[in-house]
Image (cartoon, rainbow, N blue to C red):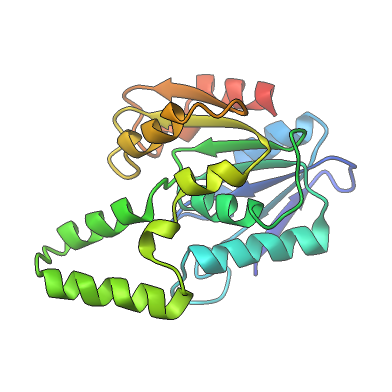
Amino acid sequence: MNGYRWNHPQHDKALILHGFGSAAHKFEDYAKLLAAKGYEVLAFDAPAHGHSEGTRTNAIEYCDMIKEVIAKHGPIQHFLAHSFGGISLSLALEDIPHDEHTKVVFIAPATETTSAVDGAFNMLKIKNEKVRDEFEKLVFKVSGKKTEWYSMRRAMHNIKASVLWIHDEDDDITPWADALKVKEDNHPNIKFLLTKGLGHRKIYHDPAVKKRLIQFM
């Protein structure tokens, strides 16, 4: 597990979690901004990403890595997670002690695993229902849970943290339609910031997004 640390030691700590196919160093700007705010900042490459070991991973392994980081370097009061890091963090928070003073920012999080699977099957042009059924059986055999359980909408009912959820209407990787359902659940601890035209990756480079995020944290 490869990681980085800035502004050590400080009482208040922030953990940055990157998305699928990305790496911790791509969030260096946020690390600098959070360190300037007085936080000790931690960022780790997910399993099979960046300089961390492995050739493949999933949300369960990423979730376990988050819990391991907190066990070694915690307590951590502030979290920033993009895309795949978002759903992994939401699963971890269900098992990690936290309260309304914990601050969490989700940027374009992977809200529903079923949508990710749908996208993968469409990309591979797999239309055979029997193949999809076997895939779903394999997920359950490996994890003991159905694909739809890996859902941020489900997990958010168990999360007490103060949350800022940032999403773009035009995100073609993690659809706003999935996140909208979370918004419609009207959780009092979740604030939404909706952008347009930034898509899935430009969104975390946007100066206005950075400013709002740092203010919230």
User: Relative to the observer, which residue lies in front, 137 or 15?
Assistant: 137
Q: Quadrant of the N terminus?
A: bottom right
Left or right of 127, for residue 139: right
Number of labels in the image equals: 0
The location of residue 122, given as percent across then percent down, is 16, 57
The location of residue 69, given as percent across then percent down, is 73, 61
Residue found at x 55% / y 69%: 61
Vertically, is 133 above or below 190? Answer: below
Residue found at x 31% / y 45%: 173
Residue found at x 43% / y 79%: 142
The location of residue 113, given as percent across then percent down, is 37, 55
The location of residue 115, given as percent across then percent down, is 30, 51
Residue 201 seen in this snapshot: yes
User: Relative to the observer, which residue lies in front, 34 or 69?
Assistant: 69
Residue 205 seen in this snapshot: no
Instruction: Give the image quarter of residue 103.
Output: top right
Q: Quadrant of the C terminus?
A: top right
Instruction: Give the image quarter of residue 39.
Output: top right
Instruction: Give the image quarter of residue 56.
Output: bottom left
Left or right of 156, for residue 76: right
Residue found at x 34% / y 78%: 138
User: Relative to the observer, which residue lies in front, 211 or 124?
Assistant: 124
